[in-house]
Amino acid sequence: MRTRPTTWRLGISLLGSAAMLSQFGPARAQDGGNITVLDKILVDAESDEILLQDGYVAKKDRIGTKTDTPIVRIPQAVSVVTQKQIEDQKPRTLNESLGYTASANPNSFGFDTRYDAFFLRGFQAFYNGMFRDGLRQYNGPSAWFKTEPYGIEGVTILKGPASSLYGVSGPGGIVNVVTKRPKEEQYREVEMLMGEHNRFQAGLDASGPVNEDGSILYRFTSLGRNSDTDLPGYPDDKIYLAPAVTFKPDEDTKLTILGEYSKSVTGGTAAFYNPTYGNLSNVYEGDPAWNDFDQTQGRIGYEFEHRFNDVLTVRQNLRYNAVDADIEYSGNYSIGQDQPLQRYWGHYTEDIKNFVVDNMAQFEFDTGPVKHTAVAGIDYAWSDYDAGSGLSYVSIDDIKAAPVPYVGGQEMNQVGVYLQDQMEWNDFTLFASGRYDWVDTTSTAADFTKSKQDDSAFSGRLALSYQTEWGITPYVKYSTSFSPNIGFVYDDVNSDITRVARPTKATQKEIGVKYEIPDYNATISAALFDIDQKDGVVFDASTGINKQRQLDLNSRGIELEANASLDNGFSVIASYTYLRVKIERGAEGTVGKELSATPNHILSLWGHYQFENGTLEGLGLGTGVRVASSSYGDDTNTFKNEARAFVDASLSYDFGYRNPDLEGVKLQVNAKNLFDNQRTICSAGYCYRDEGRSLFA
């Protein structure tokens, strides 16, 4: 396996053109014309204490247990998108990074770069399942914190209920992104990208020690992008700045400060006109003159850790973040058969502010032959958002001139206490965790009247794993989840009678097996799960008006996943999911039916080969396929969405293999949906279109 340079790394991404490359070589000392190339250091992961990874294979992760536990020993399905996978596949959004993950369905809404909207095991996870660095990342109705893939080291997907450690969350699981952190060795990277749709992007990533003893480290990651897209008047522009500093006064104490400022402009409308439900026209709803989704976001926080002795370690993680969204959108509506379509224009604004802090203590001790790793903690979260919305059926000038009326807001306070004990006896590991949450919510209506809602619940997890001498680890798990719902719902959408929404609760039974292949950097896992969700909130558009109602769902499925990065230069990711989500209580005509836009079969396979020697030395080839079976287009199961298949590819050349002076210079081209396969997908009242072929890096 070739090592990565530790000083300068220049990534050049080009499409159909040549470029003059500035030559950034390894660190060199010149003395009398002689050049000495410094030794290279292999860097398999950037945050070993948070996420230990080697190529496409993750070894340890803190999100599953809040302790540094080998993933193979965690009695729960865990998938990880490693940094190597991100570098090879070049995802443009968090959604794209999940495309090769078992039970993750990030393609339910077609082309839409505005949001990271994904499902886990059939349940939406983008509102209450989004975490960053182990802390909840609250999203508003439209002001969602956007993740920049260039700024992260990896993504961990913890599947199934996770409320016993993380509190309010859905039954499908949580997604945790790991921010790039300061490195102990000097590191410099410049990346330039050009592609279709006038896409121009430049990134800078610099890190290393500030002082001689390495007790202060820094990292600065930045990105600038200017780009059009498939749709007229729908940009994909961004500025991203992320500074980070680590202080290590001694080997037992560490403080890392993480920040971000980001400003993006995308399209306010990604939809096409639906003349009838299930039929998507070629009429784009957006108006290029009124179609900017302007979002500014920022975050600042820290991670503190101190080890007192072999028994006690304390940690405190804290973050404040804010999102401000200003959305221009438009659409068409019909006034009668054979009549021209009429237009409307809308203006929506929303800002959300979050504060979250997690305090925990980790205890390591023995009771006879049993080794304990226990965690006790208390966390607090506060979130507040306000929204405004205006609509005009007259003209763009009319909506521009009109003030945006206030339509409501919400403030939430949440406190949770939790306890977990991880008990190891011989090759058995028993996990027992419990948590109690109190959630207080104050909602403000458009007329500024306020209503309050208090919810509380206990969540738990009990799991057992056994590690055999052959590297095979079977496990069994039972867990629960809890998520309060705000506002009112309709039991009958044809009526005007509403009631306060009940909290969503879920239970899951899961059995599985993990296999860490001896002497190979490869893992295989399988899981069988059964999830019962009570009082999930969905939108019902059967009356022509979106109304919230609650329903019960059952999700059953099988997951198979394999990851490998071998010494011969070959890396592979393979996954298969069988999923069946049935409605057990819902609108008339839906009971016993399958949930819309939820394929029964999802298959993905990605392989990458790096030529290490010979004539093609330095060449990297990657290709993958993502396949989803047909799914129902509505919850009454009256028609189906077509099966879909997408092929992706990557081609790269590392110039350092041929010329040591060019170590770190790499040319890479990526393609998404290589064969331009565009399909329509409908889901509970709306239809969307997949993105066509994109060439970029």
Image (spheres, rainbow, N blue to C red):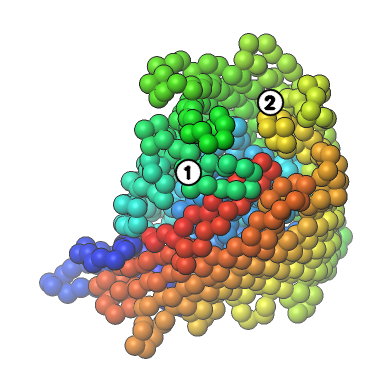
- Which residue is nearer to you in this view: 527 or 96? 96
SS label for mark 2: strand
Quarter-wise, where is residue 39 in the image? bottom left
Q: Amino acid type of disc 1?
A: Val
Q: Quadrant of the C terminus?
A: bottom left
- Residue 413 disc label: 2
Label drawn at residue 12 = none
Sequence-wise, the earlier of marks 1 and 2 is 1
Q: Position of residue 553 (x, y in %)?
A: 81, 46
Q: Nearer the viewer, mark 1 or mark 2?
A: 1
Name the residue at the left extreme.
32
Q: Which residue is mark 1?
A: 283
Residue 583 visible here: yes
Q: Please tell me whether residue 258 is drawn above or below residue 204 in the rendered image.
A: above
Q: Residue at x 33, y 78 (%)?
A: 657
Identify the residue at image location x=57%, y=31%.
336
Q: Residue at x 58, y 53 (%)?
A: 680
Residue 81 located left or right of residue 35 = right
Q: What residue is shown at x 37% (from left), y 88% (from top)?
A: 614
